[in-house]
Amino acid sequence: MMMMDQMLDLPPPLSNEVPMMHHMINGDAPQQVILVQVNPGETFTIRTEDGALQCIQGPAEVPMMSPNGSIPPIHVPPGYVSQVTDRNGSGQCQLYCETKCESVIVLTLQVSNVQSRSALVSWTSVSVSGSSGRVPSCSYELQLKDKGRDGKYKVVYSGEELQYTLTDLRPATDYHVRVSTVCNSMKGPSSDARAFTTHSAPPDTPLPPRLSHRTKSSLTLQWKVYVYDVLAMLFVIPDCIVLSSFHFQGKKNSIFREYYVGHQRHCKVMGLCPAVGYTFRVAALNDIGTSGFSTEVVFNTTGSLPQTSLPPRLAQAGPSWVTLEWTRPNSCSNEEVVTYTLEMQDETKGLDFQAVYSGLELNRKVETLKRNTQYKFRVSEWRSAPSSLLVCKTTPDRPGPPVNPAVNAVTYHSFCVTWEPPQDDGGSGDLTYVLEISEGNLEGISEGPERKHLCEDLKPATSYSLRLSCVNVVNLLIPSTVGNVKHKEMTLQWDGPLCGEESENVEFSLEMCAMEEGSEPTEVYCGSKTECTVGNLLPGTTYRFQVRAANSAGYGPYSESVEISTAAGPPGQCSPPAINVRSHTCADVTWEVMSSGIDISEYRLDWGRDLDSLELVYSGMETCFQISNLEASADYCCRLQAVNQAGAGPYSDLVMYRTPAAAPDVVSGFCCVDHPLNPTDNEPFSHSTCLALTWDEPHCNGAEITSYCISIGDRIFTTRNETCHIIRDLLPDSEYSLQIRAENEMGPGPFSQILTVRTRPLPPSPPRLECAAVGPQSLKLRWGFSSRSQLTDDTTYTLQMENRNQRFVVVYRGSSHTFKLQRLSESSQYRFRIQAVSEAGEGPFSETYTFSTTKSLPQTLKAPRVVQLEGNACEVTWESIPPMRGDRISYVLQVLGGRDSDYKQVYKGDETSFQLSGLQWNTDYRVRVFACRRCVDTLQELCGSFSPSAHFNLRRSDATLAVEADITRVPMGKTLTDEQFAGLIVFGVASLSVLMAFLLQLLI
């Protein structure tokens, strides 16, 4: 039978008498090998040969060696059941384990505030001190097990706190936690495991897509978006995939465009340009939300990078034709045949470019054009992108002569000449009239746009000849652009007059004027070159340019003006957006369309709690956006930005917004705990009639929570602004459904989910305690059933004993009905009480029982010594025993001699020697002695066991010699036990039966 023994005031664990089996067993000395079986989850502590403590974690078998053949006390944790196997051939024996009662018992373990990747674990404990009455200093070890892995617990926290927040958990995963105590480097038993499941969450950020195939015009991408599912132990794919990309051009304001949304893990992107890089990123979606985008990757289509052809330039221009020329690309070899395509855009016929030439030549005359009309040209070769645009105009034609000249208002020294414009102005309405007068030789007297002139300072009575002509800008080409027009500058070129001497020095003056009303023309260039770059322009603005030439005779007329617009630049600053309140969680943001809205490609709205946390929430062409999932009574801010092809404009002014307050959110973490968080001494707490509730404080949504309402059936309990409450006066072993909600000045919040709890049955009554066996140093106690109700098999018992400080300490806790206490003091009183514990809770303690140990018998003396004296006398001496707890010790000497069959008492007294006389010669004698204890308080005499007998033979001798008798001692270790003696009797009877049967067989 296995016993669980608990002792008080223990000596140091495992004396050096029993070392671990690290060495060979010496065969010369009596030795014994024992095996100590350590239970799973328990710790076995031993003291090694060097005095250090060694802890062995169960399950394990610990081999131990006893040099002198005895089994010493072995100290193990409380409630530990050990079985020791004897390997010296004597069979199996039992080991009664001794331990010191000093531990911390963890009562409850709770998991709250469970999120997708974290959970809060808290626990409570009750300290139980040992015989010294001192509360041990303990720490806690929190262990976590993932059901989906190897199933082993791992220590995630070690310290003295009573709560710990688990982090880095996986979503939708089952976990188990348990906690244990560590006191004085000794690890106690673990608490019951508590299981919980983390919430689901959006998918993890997927890996970037990878390229599986590419061509000149397409890219085939693949991606892996695996999420580990601990329940199914499989890899699963999220519900949806979003692939977005943008053409990689190296611009700061490049914008991703959504290209694919679906369940596939591959996508073919088509319609791309050869040898061009594209940037991609991918995100995963499920029912919970969207993951973050993966890192960006760049993939290039195949093919060589196309080179942009050089733009054509204007060689000559006429009223109906222009001659263009271009250069051969540098990348082409001389032997390579290159085909060029010249395209023209006629704005009067549409915006599309039409091919006007395709061939091998490096120049082309384009005819059948309209006079004084603007055209755009570009050139490309078969493997390159089109060149930048050349904008040029055909020249006006020569105008006809003015008509209907007339002379009037003639005086003696003047007259006035008038005329009408020509019927054909040559395609240009800007005409200059030249009037010449001759008295013998022609002389120009007037040049300008007016159609009349007053001739003065003439001679009276003289005849004059007049000649009238008109000219236009046919002699000077209008300015045209070279290359692409930028948003802040442009390059213009023009040709000089088609007439004049080659050696004549010609100077040009370029004049620019903005299209705004009241703008004055400004000369932006003056020099001999036919090309210049105009800078410091405004984006998206139209300017008017005209040029004139000057020679030694002076400046000629201005050319026809041309209107050229700069490229659109980034938009200006937007007006601050307006915010309209819909609810405490939703708001509408609206903004005005910019005046240049036709050039706007998108609006960008940034939203956040402050300037540092602003992030893009909308991009598009709409002028409104609804923002949801806001927090009540929280500050937000936003700003707006407009974007076009040239880039992004500046942000608008920051707009601040605060959401209104609202009723509190739903209460979470509503649960029932085993022990109240705010116990009161006035009202005791009983699990049978009370419920201890706790919950997490919800978000107040801008207004402080004033109270909580707890609904239990038809009753409503209103509590203060606390997160715990005790409901009393309930029925035992009854089920209740509870809900809770928070209230503030804005109103009550929603009720929480229904919590179903059940009160415990009434706790059991204590059993009757009685003493089954008593000894001088031990008490065996037993208990039975309660007088009021029969206890179940799940009932455990807590036995407590009063220590020297008059405090009750636990000496046993378990389900057994008996317990034996050892190492007690003799003739001492001990006070006990017992308590029954079941699922219903801890019952009350019983009344105090008092039991006393008996007095100890004197120890067994060693065999007496016999010394022969003169004559037929001898002296017998024996060892002495000190008084026991004030009681005197007396000795009784007995002699067995000759043919006597019984010992005879020859002496009783306090002395330790006695002389025998009148003995017979050559006769064998045996003497033995035992001690008696004279109890002073009870006048009772307690006698110990006989010592081993001493044998001697009195021999005749002439001289008086001191003879040491031949004493035969029987070692205690060889004394037959009751079991061995019974076995010897059975063996003798069996042998006698076999012998008699054999004799009967011979006689028959």
Image: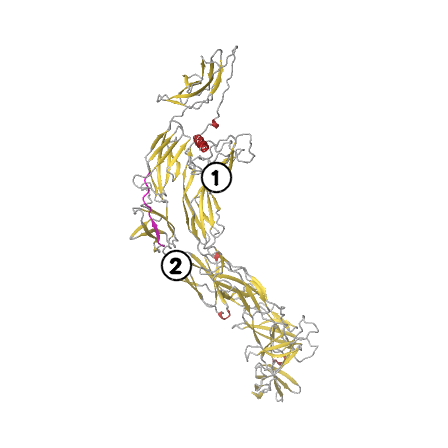
Percent across and percent down for residue 96 are 44, 34
How is the rendered protein coloured?
Answer: secondary structure
Residue labelled with disc 2: 584
Within-10-Å neighbours for mark 2: few <14, some 14–19, many 20+? many
Percent across and percent down for residue 780 are 38, 33
Q: Residue at x 29, y 40 (%)?
A: 788
Q: Is residue 634 something that shows in the picture?
A: yes
**Where 590 falls versus 969 (above or below)?**
below
Helix, strand, or loop for circle 1?
strand
Q: CA distance from mark 2 to mark 1?
A: 66 Å
Percent across and percent down for residue 58 are 48, 41
Within-10-Å neighbours for mark 1: few <14, some 14–19, many 20+? some
Instruction: Give 818 or 689, whichever is nearer the viewer.
Output: 818
**Where 739 falls versus 547 (above or below)?**
above
Q: Is residue 802 something that shows in the picture?
A: no
Percent across and percent down for residue 567 are 56, 70
Magenta residues (range): 753-766
Q: Quadrant of residue 844?
A: top left
Q: Amino acid at mark 2?
A: His
Helix, strand, or loop for circle 2?
loop
Instruction: Give 143 or 911, whichever is nearer the viewer.
Output: 911
Does residue 765 show up magenta in the picture?
yes
Residue labelled with disc 1: 37
Left or right side of 328 for 683: left
